[in-house]
Image (spheres, rainbow, N blue to C red):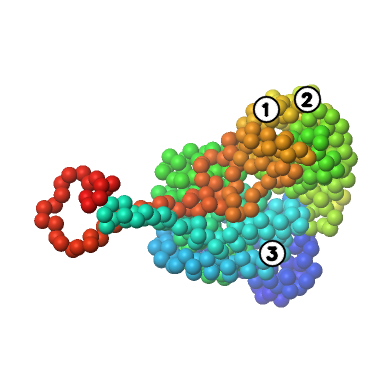
Amino acid sequence: ASTAACISSVKARFATAGLQLPLETMLRASIQRAARQGFASMSSVPKVKNFIGGEWVDSKATKFVPVTNPATGEVIAETPCSTAEEMQAAVDACKDTFNSWKGVSVSERQRVMFRYQALIRENMGDIAAAITREQGKTLADATGDVFRGLEVVEHACGLASHMMGETVENVSKNMDTYSYQVPLGVCAGIMPFNFPAMIPLWMFPMALTTGNTFLMKPSEIVPGASMILTDLATQAGVPAGALNVIHGQHDAVNFICDNPDIKAISFVGSNQAGEHIYKRGGASGKRVQSNMAAKNHACIMPDANRQHTVAAMTGAAFGAAGQRCMALSVGVFVGETKDWINDIVEEAAKLKVGPGNVEGTDIGPMITPAAMQRARDLIASAEEEGATILLDGRNVSVPGYEKGNFLGPTVITGVKPGMRCYDEEIFGPVLVCCEVDDFDNAITLINNNMYGNGTAIFTNSGAAARKFQYETEVGQVGINVPIPVPLPFFSFTGSKASMHGDLQFYGKTGVKFYTRPKTITSLWREDDAAVAVAPLAMPMLGQDGK
């Protein structure tokens, strides 16, 4: 159908889906992008397409996964479970393009990223709107999702200095040894639902700039942002075949793990999936980085700024409906700071729960009814196991959005290790509170937890901060910073059960993940005299003249 004929239909659908786009120009842009990105029809529930060899391709799948607006319960799209033939065609496109793409100068690959970051900035509103519509987070939070990914693209614009090898001159007479960091080949990424823009941008810009080709599998329940990002990448100059997109669930994951042409897998998501991918991909000889679940603790010291701490804890525990792998989900209150829990309850009770596109909303919906029910069950288990619910979000009501997956902020106190609400990642707007007598017990509690994504301390003591950063066995530490996610010139360094694989996302270790060292030993003799007798003994390179 023509753009003009679709305007009123699209406007009605977006309004029902909870997306307010009053400007006709924005609607026209959305329709034109949808046509490019593989929505089969704007007069029925659109079906997402594969992106193979530079073309949006209708899937021949017989199974589709509904994409549901979590604020309304409305199905707004369907994602195919790509067929085996489609997935192999995507890998073949990656493989066929690899040699030509790695042959493009690193300077030109960086220029592609320069153009790409500009396009992301220009289209940030559209990407954020797609995230809010499919994932539920507020528009402000969705914009932050895009921006934190954009920072990695900006980092990729100057990646060449991190790709430099090493050299030693005269390892022996007339002999030099030097090394390069060379691309691996076909790499793949398996994306989570909670950061539809940031996590893809952690992966494929780094992989492409280092000379690899990339196969992306977005989360099947939030594909929209990945589709826009793929479209923009082609506009920026990523050649046909260098970036391909497939869709699906378990079969697609196993295909990526098993395919012999795929050399490396990046994954962010749950422990169950991450451990499976790490083991199965590793068994196939692949390099795997797998960032998984977390239970991030905040240590609150009596000398901390009370107002700052309460505000930071409230935002970090309940923002994005707690659906962040770096959410502060456990408060460790030292000594008299247990009295501050009531301050957090008071602030959390003020937060407005509602659709992410509605102005004034602080907490959007959870991703699915199943995720919401699991969080509700864990809250109930806390009460059954002897904890106290000071603020209960299970009865929250959002008028006009009765089918939404809403759970209000919840604060549970009297929590101890061994309780389900402490041991398991809730992944919802729930703060569990542990009370300890002293600082050493707080550090012990944090170190005994199996996860190691992040932790934070709130204090005005430099000595306490120094002790905490030195003694805690967690990969990322914040000092008066609630969510210590490093900027891209560092790396995301989650640890323990939160991370499998010893090469982390982005930064210097991200470059190492997507490259391998290649070492050359070169001999150019001062005289070109032929060797009369071929040497048969093992060469001893450390001796001059040999």
Which mark is first along the chain, 3 or 1? Answer: 3
Q: Amino acid at mark 1?
A: Thr
Label 2: few (<14), some (14–19) or many (≥20) C-alpha neighbours in 10 Å: few
Q: Is residue 139 visible?
A: yes
Q: Which mark is residue 150?
A: none
329 to 214, vertically: above or below: above
Label 1 sits on a secondary structure element that is helix
Q: Extreme left residue here?
A: 532
Q: Extreme front residue here?
A: 544
Q: Quadrant of residue 49?
A: bottom right
Q: Which mark is residue 124?
A: 3
Which mark is first along the chain, 2 or 3? Answer: 3
Label 1: few (<14), some (14–19) or many (≥20) C-alpha neighbours in 10 Å: few
Where residue 334 sits: x, y (%)?
78, 30
**In the displayed structure, does residue 107 sit left or right of residue 325?**
left
Label 3 sits on a secondary structure element that is helix
42 to 276, vertically: above or below: below
The residue shown at (58%, 39%) is: 495
The residue shown at (64%, 42%) is: 476
Label 2 sits on residue? 437
Where residue 279 sits: x, y (%)?
48, 38
Q: Amino acid at mark 3?
A: Met
CB under 8 Å between discs 1 and 3: no
Where residue 243 sits: x, y (%)?
51, 61
The residue shown at (19%, 63%) is: 527
Q: Amino acid at mark 2?
A: Asp
Label 1 sits on residue? 444
Label 3: few (<14), some (14–19) or many (≥20) C-alpha neighbours in 10 Å: many
Q: Quadrant of residue 9?
A: bottom right
